[in-house]
Image (cartoon, grey):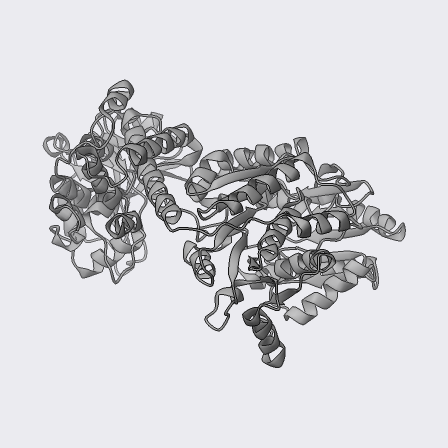
């Protein structure tokens, strides 16, 4: 049951004066709520301003800035109404302060209203966004036009909020001020000693100062106000993960201890030796599997660090105990790549591996399902098809999930539900900064693979403008004649598959003219069989250049491919560039990555290209990507596994996250049921930041 003192915060925004059904729906959209559920008071209070109107400083008209929201004190000089019967031309009013003239613009004007608002010869205070037209300043959207007496009543520091259609800053500000009046005084959930050391305000005081700042600095991300609220949100995240972790650990596992005969057979079949890092990872995972508690482990490794082999050795351990293991990948291509790597090695150990994807139909599918159910399939590799209702395992004991951030937590649980006390190993080739790893995988133990396996060579990275495209194509032609194979990645032109494909088809046509019969094309709208056929041609060397769109995860492992060309590389995030570069440098021959860009470049894009040229360390790149793009975009917009933070910015508040994790672990050690006075207060924190799942786990014991 939610504590009753939180009820005012979970009331609908329609209980506020002036908010009807239409505005309630708009506010739901704005705050990320479902329209049918509607926005609540708490959603308004957690909606963070992104700017500030500062009325304490009023520039003269001659000193107006090039853009931004300004407040001007001026006298109304004259009205310039539009010609009669032409409502499309706006009504203009000129105001002056003796240093210059400013024009106020009114579209669809009501003449009586404007003359009353701005009587000629009278002084007014005008606030709004400055624009320049023909070298002269104007304000087309005024926030306030008031006489001196009313100006004194306006907030001197007014927050500016992210908005949506149908919601103005003035309307939203009024609603937030009403919401603040509903804010109860809640018991303090932070440790008193820590709160005193940081000199942070209480939660309610911090919210009041966020929405009614005393100084412009109150809105700075590193202010005591923002840090307090960010820490509250991060603590709720870490406490929820700690509760999930405790719950998962409480559900007894099954010891999967095996002498390791099958692992040894696979190691003998490998054409290389494991790196020290891989050996340590296997030891950690095997020790985890042998314990009576369920394993929850993240295997994090850079592109090409050898995660698949580590996963196979873990799967072989499960099979040696007589159970089954499954590996789930986010795309058909990656599932097939994993199967191609795993099946022959597993066969050397006498293990049968099957592949199940959405493309398997009819009798072939029935045969695969029968093998899984009977246990003839020791290892199963597949896509999300694995957790569909008709898939039944004889005895699933280990689930391996590749690129977990592409799946929601529910999908992970659905796969685990296919067996009894299933151990979980999550893999990711996206190097994740420590701060993100804590928020995404805080309920797991982490194993990091460092370095590259034997045979992996460094990739020489160059940067070149698109103006030199002809030169690039000529060098590519020469390289292909000498036997080279290359990827050519086309950019995301806009949020549209169609635009991607058009761009890729255009590049394919141009390259096919320069290199007849040597170029293939793959994109997301091709049928799976057609895509596989082109990839097989590339893998076998019948074509030399593979043109691909970004919607296709180029997951083919082709050691002979030594060239990666990325068109309009400045449009990509660092992590994606690094992933693509990792597709070459997999064989013995020297490899190169060429990043093509178009001017003008933003400072961020320039920095991205500089970092790519300077390092191949995925973890260094991931930290830089977090700094440049923020957490929301790092794993793709709104990935299903990514928590939505409102107050915290992981790029700026990362150091608070480690403290929040330590705090959450201390709470779990001292008060796992959240039954003490501080525990009761922390329950309120979990509700406020919608970590209700954790509350349910508490109730379930």
Q: Residue furthest right?
A: 482
Q: Which residue is at 83% across, 43% downward?
A: 589
Q: Position of residue 143 (x, y in %)?
A: 24, 41
Residue 394 lies left or right of residue 656; in this view the side is right
The answer to which image quadrant residue 68 occupies is top left
Q: Which residue is nearer to you in this view: 259 or 592?
A: 259
Q: Which residue is nearer to you in this view: 164 or 271?
A: 271
Q: Residue furthest bottom?
A: 363
Q: Which residue is at 72% across, 44% downward?
A: 467
Q: Residue furthest top?
A: 197
Residue 25 lies left or right of residue 523; in this view the side is left
Residue 96 lies left or right of residue 264; in this view the side is left
The answer to which image quadrant residue 507 occupies is bottom right
Q: Which residue is at 13% across, 50% downward?
A: 16
Q: Position of residue 459 (x, y in %)?
A: 74, 38
Residue 206 lies left or right of residue 510; in this view the side is left
Is any atom of residue 278 visible in this view? yes
Q: Position of residue 486 (x, y in %)?
A: 77, 51
Q: Which residue is nearer to you in this view: 197 or 164?
A: 197
Question: Number of numbered discs present?
Answer: 0
Q: Which residue is nearer to you in this view: 241 or 156?
A: 241
Q: Is residue 335 above or below residue 593?
A: below
Is any atom of residue 568 visible in this view? no
The answer to which image quadrant residue 159 occupies is top left
Q: Position of residue 151 (x, y in %)?
A: 15, 32
């Amino acid at each position: 049951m939610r504590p009753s003192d939180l009820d005012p915060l979970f009331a609908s925004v329609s209980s506020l004066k002036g908010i009807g059904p239409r505005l309630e729906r708009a506010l739901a959209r704005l705050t990320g709520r479902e329209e049918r559920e509607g926005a609540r008071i708490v959603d308004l209070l957690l909606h963070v301003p992104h700017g500030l109107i500062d009325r304490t400083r009023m520039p003269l008209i001659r000193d107006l800035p090039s853009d931004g929201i300004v407040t001007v004190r001026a006298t109304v000089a004259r009205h310039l109404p539009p010609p009669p019967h032409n409502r499309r031309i706006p009504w203009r009013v000129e105001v002056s302060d003796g240093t210059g003239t400013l024009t106020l613009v009114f579209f669809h004007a009501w003449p009586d209203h404007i003359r009353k608002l701005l009587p000629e010869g009278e002084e007014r205070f005008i606030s709004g966004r400055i624009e320049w037209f023909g070298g002269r300043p104007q304000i087309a959207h005024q926030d306030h036009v008031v006489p001196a007496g009313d100006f004194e009543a306006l907030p001197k520091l007014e927050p500016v909020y992210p908005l949506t259609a149908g919601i103005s800053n003035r309307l939203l500000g009024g609603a937030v001020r009403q919401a603040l009046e509903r804010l109860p005084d809640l018991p303090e959930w932070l440790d008193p000693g820590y709160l005193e050391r940081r000199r942070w305000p209480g939660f309610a005081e911090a919210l009041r100062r966020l929405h009614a700042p005393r100084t412009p600095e109150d809105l700075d991300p590193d202010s005591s106000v923002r840090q307090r609220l960010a820490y509250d949100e991060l603590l709720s995240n870490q406490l929820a993960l700690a509760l999930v972790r405790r719950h998962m650990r409480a559900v007894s596992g099954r010891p999967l201890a095996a002498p390791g005969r099958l692992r040894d057979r696979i190691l003998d079949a490998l054409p290389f030796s494991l790196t020290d890092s891989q050996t340590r990872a296997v030891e950690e995972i095997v020790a985890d599997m042998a314990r009576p508690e369920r394993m929850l482990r993240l295997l994090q490794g850079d592109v090409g660090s050898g995660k698949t082999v580590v996963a196979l050795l873990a799967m072989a351990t499960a099979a040696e105990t007589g159970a089954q293991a499954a590996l789930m990948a986010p795309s058909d291509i990656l599932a097939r790549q994993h199967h191609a790597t795993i099946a022959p090695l597993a066969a050397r150990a006498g293990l049968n591996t099957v592949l199940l994807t959405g493309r398997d139909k009819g009798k072939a599918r029935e045969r695969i399902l029968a093998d899984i159910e009977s246990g003839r399939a020791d290892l199963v590799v597949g896509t999300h098809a694995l957790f569909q209702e008709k898939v039944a395992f004889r005895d699933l004991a280990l689930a391996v999930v590749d690129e977990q951030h592409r799946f929601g937590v529910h999908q992970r649980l659905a796969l685990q539900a296919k067996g009894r006390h299933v151990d979980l190993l999550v893999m990711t080739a996206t190097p994740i900064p420590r701060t993100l790893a804590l928020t995404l995988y805080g309920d797991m133990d982490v194993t990091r693979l460092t370095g590259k396996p034997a045979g992996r060579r460094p990739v020489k990275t160059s940067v070149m403008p698109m103006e030199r495209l002809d030169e690039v194509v000529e060098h590519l032609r020469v390289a292909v004649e000498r036997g080279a194979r290359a990827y050519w990645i086309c950019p995301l032109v806009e949020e549209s598959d169609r635009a991607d494909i058009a761009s890729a088809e255009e590049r394919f046509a141009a390259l096919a003219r320069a290199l007849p019969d040597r170029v293939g094309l793959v994109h997301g709208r091709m049928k799976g069989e057609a895509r596989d056929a082109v990839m097989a041609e590339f893998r076998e060397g019948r074509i030399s250049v593979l043109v691909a769109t970004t919607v296709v995860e180029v997951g083919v492992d082709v050691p002979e491919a030594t060239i990666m060309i990325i068109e309009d590389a400045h449009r990509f995030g660092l992590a994606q560039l690094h992933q693509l570069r990792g597709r070459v440098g997999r064989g013995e021959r020297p490899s190169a990555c060429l990043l093509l860009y178009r001017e003008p470049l933003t400072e961020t894009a320039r920095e991205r290209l500089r970092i790519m040229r300077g390092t191949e360390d995925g973890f260094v790149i991931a930290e830089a990507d977090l700094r440049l793009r923020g957490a929301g975009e790092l794993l793709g917009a709104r990935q299903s596994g990514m928590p939505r933070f409102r107050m915290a910015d992981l790029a700026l508040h990362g150091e608070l996250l480690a403290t929040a994790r330590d705090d959450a672990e201390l709470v779990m050690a001292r008060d796992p049921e959240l039954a003490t006075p501080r525990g009761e207060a922390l329950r309120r924190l979990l509700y406020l930041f919608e970590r209700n799942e954790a509350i349910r786990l508490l109730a379930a014991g």
